[in-house]
Amino acid sequence: MKALSRRQWQFIALALLVFAALKVALISWYLQQRQPAAPAVTSVSCSALQQGCALPNGSVLRFVDGPRQRSPFTLTLSKQGSEAPTAEFSMQDMDMGFNRYRFVDGGGHWQAKVTLPACVTGSADWLLDLHQDGHIYRIAFRAS
């Protein structure tokens, strides 16, 4: 069997590089198609937490007891959809760890008993991210 010439080796190397680049491109495309896009966060303004905050989807979120630091309080949400919503608390530019609360069926509404995470800065300015039916609603509030 005759040995391959330098030109033949260069052609084989080029073909392998093209094949590798094509493989990387196809894998990247496949992975991008598999990952669903993260839902956009919709900011909701609410000045009367205990009277209720109307959300864009028509449901109403209410802080039954009023938000308090270091004490549990209750959130209710008018029933919308069949999947139980969840709530997470954070602060602006501050990770508060994992603190997701799942709402439970409370008859004609969803409800959750929650406790705000401990904050070492003593700040009372919170963000509530409410996950409901593929949407995320962000409500800024101040705890007492």
Image (cartoon, rainbow, N blue to C red):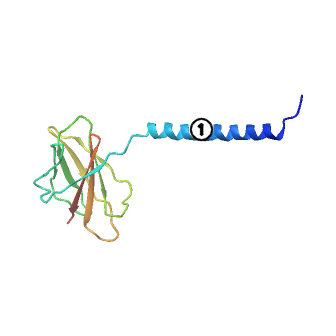
Q: Residue furthest right?
A: 1
Picture coordinates of residue 108, whole percent (x, y)? 14, 38
- The structure residue drawn at horizontal position 27% and vertical position 59%, both measured from the top left corner, is 127
Residue 82 vs residue 32: left or right?
left
- The structure residue drawn at horizontal position 39% and vertical position 40%, both measured from the top left corner, is 36
Local crowd size for mark 1, using a 10 Å CA cut-off: few (<14), some (14–19), many (≥20): few
On screen, residue 108 above or below 52: above
On screen, residue 106 above or below 140: above
Residue 110 vs residue 96: left or right?
left
On screen, residue 144 above or below 52: below
Q: Quadrant of residue 63?
A: bottom left
Picture coordinates of residue 66, whole percent (x, y)? 16, 59
Q: Residue furthest top?
A: 1
On screen, residue 6 above or below 144: above
Q: Tell me the quadrant of the picture where the N terminus can be found.
A: top right
Picture coordinates of residue 59, whole percent (x, y)? 16, 44
Q: Residue furthest front?
A: 7
Instruction: Give the tally of numbered discs.
Output: 1
Q: Quadrant of residue 79?
A: top left
**Residue type at tag 1:** Leu
Is 47 in front, or is 35?
35
Is 40 in front, or is 87?
40
- The structure residue drawn at horizontal position 76% and vertical position 41%, both measured from the top left corner, is 10
Q: Which residue is mark 1?
A: 22
Residue 127 vs residue 61: left or right?
right
- The structure residue drawn at horizontal position 18% and vertical position 46%, both measured from the top left corner, is 56
Q: Residue furthest bottom?
A: 121
Q: Secondary structure at mark 1?
A: helix
Q: Tell me the quadrant of the picture where the C terminus can be found.
A: bottom left
Picture coordinates of residue 33, whole percent (x, y)? 44, 37
Q: Quadrant of residue 7?
A: top right
